[in-house]
Amino acid sequence: MIEITSLSKAFGKVQAVGGLTLTAGDGQITGLIGPNGAGKSTTFRVAFGLIRPDGGRVAVDGHDVVQDRIQAQRRIGALPDVRGLYPRLTAREHIRYFGNLHGLSGRALETRIDRLVELLEMDGFADRRARGFSRGQELKVALGRALVHEPANLILDEPTNGLDVVSTRAVRKLLRTMRDAGHCILLSSHLMAEVGALCDQLAIIERGRVIAAGTPERLRAWIGTDDLEEVFVQALAAAGAGGRNPCPL
Amino acid sequence: MSTLTPKGMVWPWWRRCAVVLCKEMRDHLRDRRSLALALIYPLLGPLVVGFLLQISTDAQRGNPGVHTVTVAARGLDRAPDLAAFLTRNKVTLTTPLTAEALARGEHDPVVLEIPAEAALAPPYTVRLLFDANAAAGTAIAGRVADLINGYSRQLGQRLLTARGIDPALIQPVTVERVHIGRRINMTSVLYNLIPPLLIFMIFLGAVYLALDSTVGERERGTLEPLLTAPVRRWELLLGKAGAAFLFTLATVVFNLSAYRLVLGVLAVDLPGGEPPPDSATFLLIFVMAIPVMALAVTLQLVIAAIARTMKEAQIYLGLLPLVPALPGIASAVTPAMPQLWMSCVPVYGQMTAFSRLIAGTPVSPIEITLAAITTLLAAAAIFWWATRLYEQDRTLIAD
């Protein structure tokens, strides 16, 4: 479970996140959606333990990401928006490196890597160096890296961005399987069809705070449309106009 | 709260450091740029010293005396004794260029003018015309001036003797300078180049690896995913520093071996030359250089933390060799005898000790120990500073 409470973070005069509160439960896929600059990546960076918040807290399975960072990070599978691969390491070596950093080694780790290579359809490039990988291939390696230690909680920034249709389906299937196994999954996406198809809970954020949250069905009912994109646009418009919250928390 | 327990053991810190170190070594051993630098850079110092030794050897073997110089002279017939003296001392006297040759742009580097009164009796003044901006002309003029001064002293002594006066009376006190150290020759001068070249090599030898594994990692976007792993910042930095240290260590071994090889071949048979430092001396220098390598790596980490991009880091790199050079520059301006406190100045302590070891002067264990302790303490303090920098948001996030 990931609990974000009154989170705030500013960079100079820019308030990136301002009092964001959100809970992503176990056995659920929670989607975080918002316009560019709404504070999604900053929220994720705090949750990853990369940067310290100015106020509020993020806890992963009860472990504060600032006070107890290592324990929190052991329980997170992180996919930042920057995929960041080492050009001279192979896909398999990337996953092994992160497995080692999580304290995995030996036969168990190699078996896990083989399983991820199969699950993420990386057979064709698993032993190739990462220089020249397509965006989709980079994403698969980054996903493999995030999943190698079978984390209880996944925080994924745009997990299907750059993937082809077949790979996108495979990733969605994998996420659903993990959800059904009890994992907590918090993801962001710009694709309304994706969040509609995948997420059990949605939170729309704007200027660093949640302006609407609930199940996709509840949000659709609130606005009175089946189109999630329309829900998103109307929620933003209402928040910008300072009017009624279409779907209060 | 999740009932799923995290996979993986909680390894001890050194094992996490080792994981990072092994990854960096594997990554950079595949990097041709790092390898090329690691192989080429250590050869530069030995090649420069070897090249200069070779020139020195050729000069010593080919012409054991001084070189003949050529000077255009005007009014030679007025001082045939002086002309004969100069010729005996390997000065070729020629006729000055004609007006036509001068019009064509030719010129004599040095012209000796002997005045008309030289034909009568001393004293008289000769003039040496040369361009002080031209190094060759200045060197020739200096040599000829020394010879003429010598001739003048001989002539004065002859004249005084002819008048029944003891020539020693005109110089009642003389100074005899006795050099009690090793003979000063070209080889000694060249050996003195080794310590500063070695220090520069230590600071720049594996710098690409240190920067690429830190600022390069941030620029590529690999630092952010890496920092999501459950590893403390200082553990990550120590692993990366360890890899850079091992690369530096390898380049120093390569560098000192190359010095030993080059000097062993070129300096052993040099006529009048000093024998090169032996292997034991180089081994001691290597051991003493280890704390300097640690200091160099930690400074590189700090540069990597401060710089936003590799390009910016490379600009700072231009300043990095100044750090070890500063104490040396200060001592050049205000020279002082070696004292114990100098061993406590990181890098400077080692550099002066290297110079003394190469010159054949022993260095006491207390000096070696003090230099090692203070340098390691400085390295530890700078490493702590680097870890603080890596805790800051601006150091971690590329944009």
Image (cartoon, coloured by chain):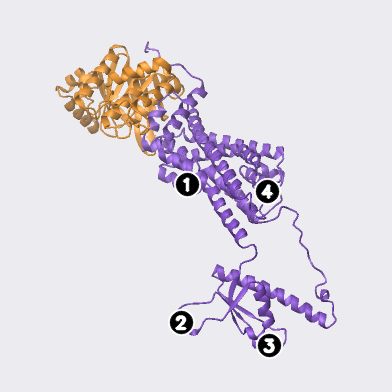
Please identify the residue farthest to the front as the structure is shown.
B62
Q: Residues within 10 Å of mark 3 (few under 14, many from 20)?
A: some
Q: Position of residue B263 (x, y in %)?
A: 60, 47
Label 1 or label 3, whichever lies nearer to me, is 3
Q: Position of residue A57 (x, y in %)?
A: 40, 24
Q: Residues within 10 Å of mark 4 (few under 14, many from 20)?
A: some
Chain-order first, disc 1 or disc 3? 3
Dot 1 lies on which element? helix
Circle 4 sits on which residue?
B359
Instruction: Quarter of the image for the C terminus of chain A: give it.
Output: top left
In the image, is B329 to the left or to the right of B172? left
Q: Colour of chain B?
A: purple
Name the residue nearer the viewer: A123 or A84: A123
Q: Residues within 10 Å of mark 2 (few under 14, many from 20)?
A: few
Circle 3 sits on which residue?
B119
Looking at the rendered structure, the kind of residue marked 4 is Ala
Chain-order first, disc 2 or disc 3? 2
Circle 1 sits on which residue?
B316
Looking at the rendered structure, the kind of residue marked 2 is Ala
Instruction: Quarter of the image for the N terminus of chain A: give it.
Output: top left
